[in-house]
Amino acid sequence: MRRLMFMMCLLAFLGGGCAYREYKEHRVLRTVDTQARSGHSSSSPKIYFERDDRGFLVVDVKKETVEQLQERDKVMYERCWEVRRHDVPDNPIEFLFFLGIEVPFVILQAVLQLVPEPGCNTWTEWADWKYTDKSRTSSMPCPGKVFLDCGPAGRYELLTDKLGKARLNMSPLLNHLTRGRKWTISAKALCDGVSVIDSIKLDTTKLGVTWDTPRTQPDFPAHLIVSVKFVDHNGNNILDDRETAYLVVTITNNGRGDAFEVDVIPRLEEKANGVVLRPAKGSRIKWIPKGRSQECIFRLTAKEEVPAQPLVIRMSIKELNGFEPLPLKVILATRPL
């Protein structure tokens, strides 16, 4: 009887020594790789307008495709475990079940030396594809016909080249449009069976084209150079009593782009008694193409009994897109009879 009790206690001890692994929740270590691919894509035809160096209206028909990108990450995971041991149950029935089931595993672990130790495992997995806020845009030319409605200047049917571009000479078109007004030119084209319509605004008050698209800024800056010439009747370079003379302001555009709405603003820096300064030929120049010059003329008039005094005239130039030269000073003098 004592031997039987001893054996049961020994088996219970061995059963309590049966070790097993208790795993913890896995965790993310780091991202080891990332893949990208094209997801959803949408295509639509577009019409773009621009003006080339020769003054031609260029109509560019393109098929634009926008691809929404997807990404997925290759993630490294880690899962760790601890070594636990079974407790010997107090209930007699559970104790008998414990002896019959757990004890053989205790003996097997002891014979094969399979007692576990604490540790961790790592592995990598690809996550699911997800859409990102990134996109990729590509364009292909759409060669074919372009129909232009230019209002009073008529309608035109143009054939595009292999790059999808058609050109219209603006010079004869402007001759049919009333100056000082804004006109709309509509364009219609067919691209892969889809009709596309767009338009531009043509402002004839500026002798140039102002677009209603983001292409409002010139591709290249203007570089303005200003010169002033004083012209009087007797050629003595002095404004005499009761004399009318002229300031001829010449503005030359040596830049690579055109200049628009150039304002010439003369101002007498000091009070000049008996002198009147007024524009004689427009103080605004609508358009100065690159490599060209334009003039503004101002009239200087000396009243009767003008005193002898210096004349300091400050010339300021303003340009629509900010391509402005530095102000300059013109120093003259008046002389009484």
Image (tube, grey):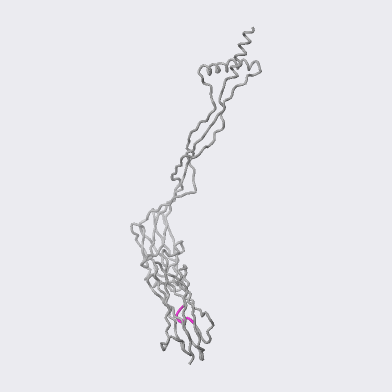
Q: Indicate whether residue 280 is drawn in magenta.
A: yes
Tally of numbered discs: 0
- Please provide the residue range marked out in magenta: 278-282
The picture quadrant where one finds residue 147 is bottom left
Residue 108 to residue 282: above or below: above
Picture coordinates of residue 81, whole percent (x, y): 55, 29
Picture coordinates of residue 243, whole percent (x, y): 46, 89
**Closer-to-camera residue (57/230):** 230
Picture coordinates of residue 111, whole percent (x, y): 51, 16
Residue 88 vs residue 290: left or right?
A: right
Q: Main secondary structure of the magenta part?
A: strand
The residue at the far left in this view is: 162
Can see residue 322?
yes
Q: Indicate whether residue 88 is drawn in magenta.
A: no
The picture quadrant where one finds residue 17 is top right
Residue 57 to residue 235: above or below: above
